[in-house]
Image: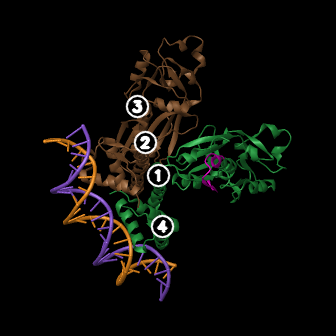
Chain colours: A brown, B green, C purple, D orange
Amino acid sequence: MDVDPRFLRTFAAVARLRSFSAAARELGYTQSAVSQHIAALEADLGTALLHRRPVAPTEAGTRLLEHGGAILLRLDAARADVMRVATGPPTRLAVGATPLSARVAARAVAAARNALPPLEASLRIGTREAIATAVATGELDAGIVDGIAAVNDPLRLPETGLPAAEVAEEELAFALPPDHPLLGRGNRVRGARLEDLVDARWIDAPAVTAPLADLAMLARADGFRAALVYDGQDVAGLLALVEAGQGLALLPEKVVATGVPLASPRLVHRTELLRGGGAAALVGITAP
Amino acid sequence: MDVDPRFLRTFAAVARLRSFSAAARELGYTQSAVSQHIAALEADLGTALLHRRPVAPTEAGTRLLEHGGAILLRLDAARADVMRVATGPPTRLAVGATPLSARVAARAVAAARNALPPLEASLRIGTREAIATAVATGELDAGIVDGIAAVNDPLRLPETGLPAAEVAEEELAFALPPDHPLLGRGNRVRGARLEDLVDARWIDAPAVTAPLADLAMLARADGFRAALVYDGQDVAGLLALVEAGQGLALLPEKVVATGVPLASPRLVHRTELLRGGGAAALVGITAP
DNA sequence: GATGATTACGGACGCCGTAAGCATA
DNA sequence: TATGCTTACGGCGTCCGTAATCATC
């Protein structure tokens, strides 16, 4: 009567790989088993979930995928959460961080090692979503993530039931090439409004900072389009692109060399700590 | 290998009813089956989830319950969501609303019936959580809920993946008894700050407006304590209590007869529409 | 001793793999 | 024709109920 999570996993894999046989290989099933999983799901729900040849989700399938992802993530988070209270404090400290939070994270890891010497520590850099997911599933013990949000608003992260604590909120600024008109004398101090720059040449750097689509959400304005997508994970590369006149980006004021502050709306660069559990994760990781 | 959702349901029922046998009766299982469900879960996770005699969740069990509730809700939401796109527009229009949104909802239902005459319509009043849950599971087609939030912030609702649209944001005011000191001449216009009233005699009316605990969260202040809890669902009763000098409450300015506006922080009374799907739910339900 | 959770055991159903069938590029 | 999804079928594991056992009030 209830949808089996294993079927959901199979369905997700098939939809992602767009192939029954590839999903079977990945999951260690036979092609036949995968076919039966999908058939069972479709029979249970009374609707086709996938088009075949080529394999693609139907409208109903798309809906199920959205829910399914959240469900599977939360299922893993539940297991990890329960295991943590069961197994007691770990001997390892695996921390994740987004590029702009790497500094804070590194300092926190160092502090933790000083406090509890015999720790096998590691630091991993990744996107907000990847870090949050890994902390939820217990792959990491703690994570420090950042993004853009309204003042005092929490970051929008995948729902995992994890407690998130504010570490810092910092002013934002537009990183601009040195010859940008906005940098002309008068405007220097006053700052620019986000609405005025909707049609500017944006650099979308989803792995470094908030994806452009998120900005559009926060600004309640459509039309943000990326002139260039930067796939790197380092701020330096992004700033180099800006300096080379390839476009502009919205970043924490502290890392911006030449640019103007964000005047409105009141958005900030927010950093949050995701606590995975165990006492070790709590040590030494506080506001910078 | 994966936690079976049925086991999760059983576990939730046992924890709620604090009894294996009662849960068995409710779910249509035998006592034995329930025992085996719990045993399977505990074996899978490698930890005790329940204390027996008396039956109560362990620390690990408590964690599982939190996740489990979210998972089961989302599972039901997934089924309902898929079914909706499969079955096409319904002939029924079941709307839910919180007490303070009843007026808006009633008008919306009336408008919808005028637009699409042959509709079997219904309107149900309940708490935010109950309405949101019912919309997610397809029990209701749409819901109108309200609560207190920071400006432009969405309401905190159970995670269901439902789209929520803002219907209105209104000013808040403290409802006060006519002889309250704050109403003395001078203060009338200026309004009062939430921090100044932390120690006041609050009436907690969780079924009518936001629970006091939510207010504490939003104000980032502890210490709000209820002098009296009002369990009714109607605003009139709550206002009568205020007028009788039993305490104060924070309500939308429009329904407050005697009181002072909320000056700070910038909180508003927010109303949101939860769209359950089907075209019918979309008709006639817009901003008032 | 009664109520209520656990354990033992048998039957039934469901899931997976092998293998044959079938559709589409 | 080849690749890849579906269907048929048999074995095995899992889940549930009956019934006996054990523990606690």
Q: Give the residue at mark 2.
A: A132
Write down the region rendered in magenta.
B111-127
Q: Give the residue at mark 4.
A: B14
For residue A75, side relative to residue B262 (left or right): left
Mark 4–mark 1 contact, CB under 8 Å?
no
Q: Amino acid at mark 4?
A: Val
Q: Amino acid at mark 3?
A: Ala
Q: At numbered mark 4, what does the secondary structure look like: helix, strand or loop?
A: helix
Residue B234 picture location, percent across and down:
71, 56
For residue B194, side relative to residue B92 (left or right): right
Return the residue nearer the eye: A101 or A35. Answer: A35
Residue A4 picture location, percent across and down:
37, 57
Specify whether residue B64 is in view.
yes
Residue drawn at x 41%, y 25% as measured from the top left: A235
Q: Amino acid at mark 1?
A: Thr
Mark 4 and mark 1 on one chain: yes
Measure the alpha-carbon separation of dots 4 and 3.
44 Å
Tally of numbered tags: 4
